[in-house]
Amino acid sequence: MWDTIGKSVFKDQRTLSFDYVPQRLVHREAQMKKLVMLYRPVVESNLSQNAVLTGSVGTGKTATAKRFCADLKDFAEKQQKAVDWVLVNCRQRNSESSAVLHVVNHFQPNFPDRGFSITEMLRILRKDLEKRKVHLVIVLDEADMLLKKAGPDIIYKLTRFGEEKVDGRDLVSLMLISQKNIFELLDASSTSTFKRTNVVEFGKYSSDELRDIVKTRAELAFHDGAIDDDAINLIAEVSSEWGDARFAIEILEKAGMLADEESTGRISVEHVRGAKAEAYSSITESKLAGLDRHQKLSLLGIARASRGKAYVTTGETESAYKVACEEYSEKPRAHTAFWGLLKDLDMLGVVSAKKSGPGISGKTTVITLLDIPAKVLEQRMRQMLKNEH
């Protein structure tokens, strides 16, 4: 059976995985440079530093954090300094104890997962850092998920812990990654340690930038000549609506798998179209999975208001949201908070919220569904809200 399978288009499929971080990140040089400037005191002056990385899905926040931290560790080693880093996925570890335990596990993989308070775990972490004479950068990925569930106290504890000195050295630096405005979730004592000048912003990728990213990954993943230029251009075009590199790379991998299934030895635009249809569904589900209750109610209202329409106004959307809240026995958020919900959904890439153009009287914001039909979205939101009870 194996000899009937044609030669694979893949040279190294691992380079298309979510966890893979290239040696050089295309079109994130400015963000890397700002991080170098911010964290220079960690190596040069033994000081702690904190930063916030913010931007929508697929804009390279996590990949940039990983690449930067790995490079920082290597640079420090050349300066005969010890710097290490650990990334905490706060979607999976959204309680204080779970997040701190993951950090402790970095040095003690077999540390028990229960029976120790946060204060005790931080004391143990301190001993590990003292023993190794190392400065640790703690990266909290999707930090808003942790802050929403656990509150801001964990940030206060970690920043104060990081400023404790051993032999004149600070122990810990923080890096928070979030799609949302993290400052709304921090209290005054925590906000004071995160200067707003320490925010590194990640804008959505343009079509040209996505093309460069796809081309670079294709060179790593596929044999020479295994993908048409037209196929690369199409991937960039279909993913540019969201500026989402993760979506583009997922389409690239699926297109390669479809080419292998058909034993064509080359990836064409037809493989890209087939891959887009598959990726479309999975990427939409991943966006919807992390919504809170009022975001779901907002989307239910948007879906209902959008039936048969290309776009709806914020007024129409808010009215439909209030009806949905009444239906599910929830008190509607005030207008300003509702506007915040719309901004969150826009940043997630589920809807597009833009200023109205010609054909609409007055200046207002119009809402458009991006990648799921209104009828399907309404059914999905009703099901998700039902499953909460």
Image: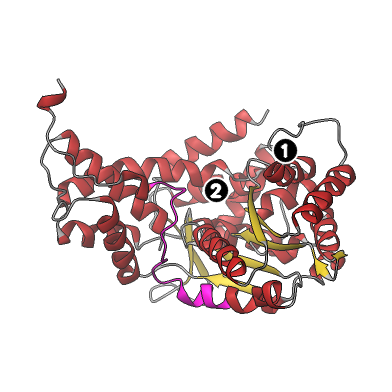
Disc 1 packing (10 Å; few <14; some 14–19; many ≥20)? few
Give the vertical position of 259 relative to 15 (above or below). above
The mark nearer the N terminus, 1 or 2, is 2
Look at the numbered disc 2 and give the secondary structure of its residue: helix
In which quarter of the view is residue 163 placed?
bottom right
Residue 100 on the magenta segment: no
Q: Amino acid at mark 1?
A: Ser
Give the vertical position of 146 relative to 362 (above or below). above
Residue named by callout 2 = 299
In which quarter of the view is residue 28 placed?
bottom left
Q: Quadrant of the C terminus?
A: top right
Look at the numbered disc 1 and give the secondary structure of its residue: loop
Foreground: 46 or 112? 46
Residue named by callout 1 = 329
Chosen colour scheme: secondary structure
Type of secondary structure dominating the magenta stretch? loop
Name the residue rendered at 79%, 41% in the picture. Answer: 97
Residue 229 location, x and y as percent? 16, 61
Q: Is residue 26 left or right of residue 223?
A: right
Residue 60 location, x and y as percent? 48, 62
Disc 2 packing (10 Å; few <14; some 14–19; many ≥20)? many
Q: Is residue 89 left or right of residue 258?
A: right
Q: Work out how far the residue at label 1 is from the one at label 2, CA to CA, in angstroms.
A: 16 Å
Q: Let me know if residue 174 appears in the view.
A: yes
Residue 28 on the magenta segment: yes
Give the vertical position of 257 relative to 266 (above or below). above
Q: Let me know if residue 313 appears in the view.
A: no
Total label count? 2
Name the residue rendered at 54%, 39% in the picture. Answer: 381
Per the rendering, the mark at residue 236 is: none
Stretch of the chain drawn in magenta: 17-34
